[in-house]
């Protein structure tokens, strides 16, 4: 079955960067885009960006543009999200998610389990 | 900062019907982009509940239904059950933000 397995929890200092991985299985990695979504403690879901694993095209939310970089390794069927210049406000659970649908109507059919990133001095 | 607004909470007794609204604008729902709904149980990742306005993935009970009209959408839960207590989010696409995916503010459903 389709699975997205994310890397484990991280504790980072302010100003540092974090890189979260999302290893996929059960489908052709290059055929479906991957979203990254953030959820701060007690808050809602925020879209960060997505990558098209087939050609590497990316699109980022304006909120994080310049601080977030999404990449992929097609040989490992894995997507990555790196967030730089961390502050305490970046403490959150970060999800990767596989997209299904078509232009203007993409939705998430499978989610990763989430990775908790804690930013603390 | 979400462009899709949901009521913070909704509640009902077991067996009752609960509806959740998702209000957008002319650059997202009103522009014809589809609305999707997710259920998030406490401490877990979200789960797809409804896609493309009113379609249920296999395995989702038919107690869950949704609709879309104009710049809004709504999710209905009929025959409310204890296991429906969760957070619910709508999601669509917005063309005004250089094209981006947007989630609703989320609604906590409580089963009384």
Image: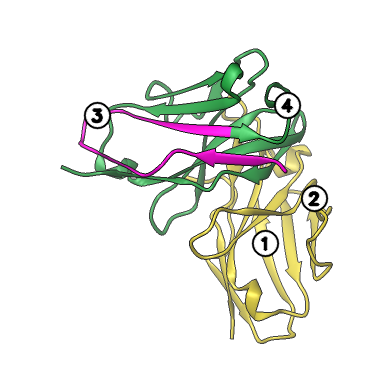
Chain colours: A green, B yellow
Does residue B65 appear to the left or right of B97 in the view shown? right
What label sits on residue A7 in the rendered view? none
Secondary structure under tag 3 reads loop
Same chain for the residues under marks 4 and 2 in the image: no
For disc 1, the marked residue is: B21
Secondary structure under tag 1 reads strand
Same chain for the residues under marks 4 and 1 in the image: no
Same chain for the residues under marks 4 and 3 in the image: yes
For disc 2, the marked residue is: B53
What label sits on residue A16 in the rendered view? 3
For disc 4, the marked residue is: A28
Task: Give the CA separation, mark 2 to mark 3.
Answer: 41 Å
Same chain for the residues under marks 2 and 3 in the image: no
Q: In front: mark 2 or mark 3?
A: 3
The image shows residue A61, relative to residue B4, as above or below, that is: above
Same chain for the residues under marks 3 and 1 in the image: no
Residue at 30% across, 28% down: A17
Please state the chain letter of the residue tagged with numbered disc 4 in the rendered image: A
Task: Give the CA separation, mark 4 to mark 2.
Answer: 27 Å
Magenta segment: does it hold A12?
A: yes
Residue at 61% across, 25% down: A77
Residue A81, position in %: x, y?
Answer: 46, 28
Find out whether the residues at labels 2 and 3 contact each other: C-beta distance under 8 Å: no
Query: In which quadrant of the rendered view does residue B33 lie?
Result: top right
Disc 1 packing (10 Å; few <14; some 14–19; many ≥20): many
Please state the chain letter of the residue tagged with numbered disc 1 in the rendered image: B
Mark 2 or 1 closer to N-term? 1
Q: Which residues are magenta?
A: A1-23
Disc 4 packing (10 Å; few <14; some 14–19; many ≥20): few
Residue at 52% across, 46% down: B2
């Amino acid at each position: 079955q389709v699975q997205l397995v994310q890397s484990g929890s991280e504790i980072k200092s302010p100003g540092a960067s974090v890189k979260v991985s999302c290893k996929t299985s059960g489908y052709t990695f290059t055929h479906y885009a991957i979203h990254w979504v953030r959820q701060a403690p007690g808050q809602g879901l925020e879209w960060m960006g997505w990558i098209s694993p087939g050609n590497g095209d990316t699109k980022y939310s304006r909120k994080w543009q310049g601080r977030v970089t999404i990449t992929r390794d097609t040989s490992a069927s894995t997507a990555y999200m790196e967030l730089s210049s961390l502050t305490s406000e970046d403490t959150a659970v970060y999800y990767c998610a596989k997209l299904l649908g078509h232009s203007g109507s993409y939705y998430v059919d499978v989610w990763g389990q989430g990775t908790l990133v804690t930013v603390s001095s | 900062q979400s462009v899709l607004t949901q009521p913070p909470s909704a509640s009902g007794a077991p067996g009752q019907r609960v509806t959740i609204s998702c209000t957008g604008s002319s650059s997202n729902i009103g522009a014809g982009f589809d609305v999707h709904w997710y259920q998030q149980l406490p401490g877990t990742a979200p789960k797809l509940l409804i896609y493309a306005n009113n379609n249920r993935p296999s395995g989702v009970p038919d107690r869950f239904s949704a609709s879309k009209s104009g710049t809004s959408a709504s999710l209905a839960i009929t025959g409310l059950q204890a296991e429906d207590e969760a957070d619910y989010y709508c999601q669509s696409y917005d063309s005004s933000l250089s094209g981006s995916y947007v989630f609703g503010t989320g609604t906590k459903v409580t089963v009384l």
